[in-house]
Structure formats: C-alpha cells, structure tokens
Image: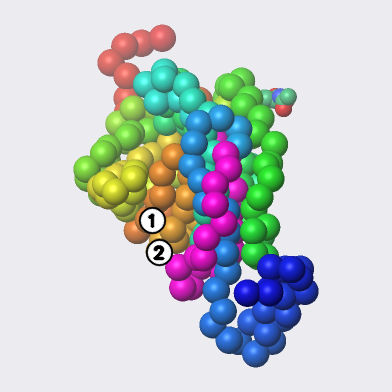
Amino acid sequence: MKSSTRPGTFLLACTLLCTLVGLGCSLSCEMCKGSGPTCSGRVKTCDEGKDACVIVVGESSTKGHHSVNTYKGCMKFSDCYPGFVSTTMGPKDYMVSNTHCCQGDGCNRGSVPPPQNNRTENGLQCASCIQPFQETCPGTEMASCVGQESRCVYFAGSVQAGIIRTKFATRGCATESACASRPGAQVPSASYLYYLRRADCLPARPHGPPASQPRGRAE
Ligand SMILES: *[C@@H]1O[C@H](CO)[C@@H](O)[C@H](O)[C@H]1NC(C)=O
C-alpha cells in the first residue's frame, strides 16, 4: 500500500471522483465519545449513506447532574444543523450543544468551542415533560425558557444510548435552531443518538396567567 505516502492527493482524488461521478466511495471520520470538551479516537469508514463527519460538544444537566460530553462520528449531511442549540425541560434538566459538520475524510479531528450556557430566564415559558420508554408525554408542567430560547418543542421517537435503544418523548423550551430538526432525522447529541418521529416547534409564550389552566384563587 503506497497510498499512505500521498494521503492528501489520494483523498482529494477520491473525493472528486465521489462527488463528480457519484461513485459510492465512503467517507471516513474520527469516532469517539467521552466526557469533557473533546475526545479522540480512530478514523473509521462510515456506514453507507452517512456523508458527513460531525463533532458535538454538549453540556447537560439531568435532574441536577451536570456533565460535559463530546461525540465524534458520521452522519447524514442533510440531518446536520450546525451551531448552537439550547433546550430546557426544567431548571435542572437542560442541554446546550455546539455542532460542527464537515465532508472530508477525517475532517472532524480537532475540536469545537464548548457552547455558551446562558441560564438567565428570558420571560418565556413552555409546557414541559420528559418521558422515557414512551412516544408521548403530557406537558402539564411549565418550564421557564432561558437565554435565546424562543420556541416550544415537542420531540418524540427513539434514543440510542450505547447498545440500548428505547422510545422517548420530551417537551420544553428550545432555541430556534432546534426547529430545523425534522421527523426521520438521526440527530446525535453529545451523549445519545436520537431518531426523531415527531418534531413540533411553536413560538414560546410570555409568562402570565395561562388561559387554559385557570387558577383557583384571586390575585
Ligand atoms: C443571557 O440571556 C438573557 C435573556 O435572554 C439576555 O438578556 C442576556 O443578554 C444574555 N447574556 C449573554 C451574555 O448573552
């Protein structure tokens, strides 16, 4: 094998052939998953149909348990919405992430800046719920949106954590960038891979007496 002596030329030629001729050559990407703002692993060939490399750095809180995680791998370029996403299901349940996608062999080596995490409430709110193992959830509680979150989302489908795949449903506040996700998309987060069957997105409402939930006391 002499191709390793001129990898740049070889890769460029392959990329051009793949792009111009539509040959089914496959991409290879660095693959890893771990705690912290970056991770490193081996560069491996992607499954067919995955035509982009991705890095996701996420900061999350689950029932107050805080963590920073990084994921690198392959995905469909058409499912990739780069940049900052913030979602909040409650004061102790949220996730912010920064995603970068690229389309060259090993192009996801390196790292991306961790997302900024602005927890200042912005006066908007959304119905919220987190429901593992089911594809619907009621949204009877309300979450206060923070930072740039201006949308209410309802995501449902299945989520893969390692070898385990289970249904999930969740509602809460999100940045508008989260609304780009469409049903059928496979969306990696820093810790899990989400398969979306439902991705609803509505404008968030200001705090105030909710019309649909009358209060039992005068103010
Ligand atoms: C954090 O979010 C609040 C509410 O949206 C906003 O007023 C403030 O400017 C943000 N701070 C930064 C540093 O972006």
Residue 177 visible in this rendered orientation of the protein: no
- Residue drawn at x 57%, y 64% as measured from the top left: 28
Image check: 47 left or right of 124?
Answer: left
- Residue 28 visible (yes or no): yes
Task: Determine the secondary structure under disc 2.
Answer: loop
Say which of 57 and 78 sits in front. 57
Residue 174 at x, y percent in the picture: 52, 39
Answer yes or no: do the residues labelled 1 and 2 have beta carbons within 8 Å? yes
Q: Disc number at residue 7?
A: none
Between residue 41 and residue 180, name the one nearer to us: 41
Residue 144 location (% of width, % of height): 49, 25
User: Measured from the top left, where is residue 143 in percent x and y?
Assistant: 43, 27
The answer to whether 114 appears left or right of 202 in the picture is right
- In this figure, which residue is indicated by the disc labeled 2? 184
Query: Which mark is first along the chain, 2 or 1?
Result: 2
Q: Residues within 10 Å of mark 2 (few under 14, many from 20)?
A: some
Q: Quadrant of residue 142?
A: top left
At 31% from the left edge and 11% from the top edge, which residue is drawn?
A: 217
> Is 60 above or below relative to 174?
above
Position of residue 179 relative to residue 173, above or below, is: below
Query: Within 8 Å: ligand 1 and the Cβ of disc 1?
Result: no
Q: Quadrant of residue 17?
A: bottom right
Q: Within 10 Å of the Cα at label 1, are there few (<14), some (14-19), or many (20+) other Cα atoms?
A: many
Q: Height in image: 23 above or below 40?
A: below
Which residue is under mark 1? Answer: 196
Residue shown at 59% from the left, 48% from the top? 55
Residue at 32%, 35% (x, y): give it.
Answer: 130
Residue range (magenta): 39-58
Residue sitting at the far front? 1
In the rendered structure, which amino acid carries the disc numbered 1?
Answer: Leu
Residue closest to the eye, 194 or 180: 194
Q: Quadrant of ligand 1?
A: top right
